[in-house]
Amino acid sequence: MGEGKECSLASVYSSMANLHLLVVMLMVLAMTSADRLNESSSMSLTIEEEKADDIDGGFSSLDGMLQWAIGHSDPAKLEESAKDVQQLPQDEIKKRQSELKELIQNLHMPSDAELMKIAINDLSNSSLSLEDRHRALQELLVLVEPIHNANDLSKIGGLAVVIQELNHVDPDTRTLAAWILGKSSQNNPEVLELGALSRLMKMVKSDGVEEANKGLYAVSALIRNNLVGQELFFAEAGVQLLQDILSNSTTDIRLQKKAVFLVGDLAVAADLEVEKHGSFFRNGILLKSVVDLTSSSDLDLKEKALLAIKSVLQLKGKTSEAAAGVLNDVCAFDASLERMRQQLRELLTTYTDDDEFQRDYAIDLEALLNEVQLIFHTKLPNSSS
Ligand SMILES: *[C@@H]1O[C@H](CO)[C@@H](O)[C@H](O)[C@H]1NC(C)=O
Ligand SMILES: *[C@@H]1O[C@H](CO)[C@@H](O)[C@H](O)[C@H]1NC(C)=O
């Protein structure tokens, strides 16, 4: 990465002016080397790739650079130019290729940190068009993928700017911002400190399916393995939020899957010294809504519900026994499991030889069901089965 080098927007944009040419040449290069697959070409993409690695920039491969450059170019113009170049005679193309080589060597390709700064600068500009705002957010979404970049985003003050976007009037802007925060939240407690959690939890209640999903994705990432985050989540009526999602049969199924997954996650990381955490897993309404999901026609949702209950039943000491008691008394868990077993068996009779994958999945699910039932019975107080 180009650490230590001041990010000059002017230099970056002047490089970008060369990008159109660069992309065209790279496309032609890709096409011509594909054409001459059997020839021992003097200059192949692999050689160029090694060269590209030496460039002081944030792109680890020529491909990454190409993707970025294409994203900043007009596709129609690009295709036209590429066609023009392709029709040139061979020696002309060769000449252009060596020009390209020189161009790559002289080009100062911006580092990821510089690109993030540009995106953050753009976002801070209130007169930016909505289209450019989306583009800046989409770039950040890709850039924060590596963990060190996510940390850099925090260092350059970018998180606060992205969190600000959660309040934007445009739902797509809010959705993209939540997605970025979810991606960059692992081991990044700063997002919590900046107060994003309650805003994200409000987004989960949105009528917009995408916004709700990305909101819950970010909430889950924020509180996973983070007890402070879980405290806040419970304090902001997180249990009610999960209950509403899980008990409402018209809720988007992806949202339900995320919610039920989070229940299991909370069980795995629970701090049972804290009363609120313990009572969460004795909450009959919540557990019942998870148990009811085992009758869903979606096998994946069935599985996630079983796994969540399994995690609850594996909680330490008295908590899992109390949960087993609630599952027995309030949720008629055994009866639900039997119904699920029946459904799976009926499903198996409908599969033909071509449905090998579904068949195996249903068989695996029944094995999981048996395992969960066994754990359930060992945890039941006065176990009599
Ligand atoms: C803000 O965005 C507008 C519209 O894209 C642009 O004209 C203006 O130069 C930008 N301002 C700054 C400070 O970048
Ligand atoms: C169930 O979800 C739908 C769609 O998200 C929503 O419109 C409805 O108000 C919810 N019902 C309850 C009882 O919360």
Image (cartoon, grey):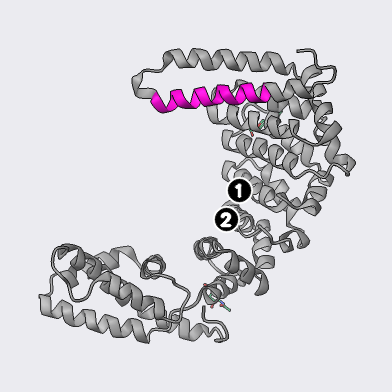
Relative depth, front residue between 124 and 261: 261
- Cα–Cα span, label 1 and label 2: 8 Å
Q: Is residue 372 magenta?
A: yes
**Quadrant placement of the C terminus:** top right
Q: Amino acid at mark 1?
A: Lys
Q: Residues within 10 Å of mark 2 (few under 14, many from 20)?
A: many
The tally of labels here is: 2
**Residue at 37% of width from left, 76% of height from top?**
52
Residue 150 higher or lower than 58, as above or below: above
Relative to 366, 291 lies left or right:
right
Residue 34 higher or lower than 344, as above or below: below
Q: Position of residue 73 (x, y in %)?
A: 37, 69
**Residue at 55% of width from left, 15% of height from top?**
343
Q: In this orientation, does residue 19 appear?
A: no
Q: Position of residue 189 (x, y in %)?
A: 73, 61
**Residue at 67% of width from left, 25% of height from top?**
372
Relative to 310, 12 lies left or right:
left
Tell me whether the residue at label 1 lies in contact with that at label 2, contact meaning CB atoms closer than 8 angstroms. yes
Q: Which residue is identified by label 2? A: 176
Q: Is residue 261 magenta?
A: no
Q: Position of residue 321 (x, y in %)?
A: 82, 27
Tell me the quarter of the picture where residue 300 sits.
Answer: top right
Q: Quadrant of ligand 2?
A: top right
**Residue at 44% of width from left, 23% of height from top?**
359
Q: Which residues are magenta?
A: 356-373
**Circle 1: element type:** helix
Residue 4 higher or lower than 116, as above or below: below
Tell me the quarter of the picture where residue 352 sits.
Answer: top left
Q: Amino acid at mark 2?
A: Leu
Relative depth, front residue between 255 and 378: 378
Q: Which residue is identified by label 1? A: 214
**Circle 2: element type:** helix
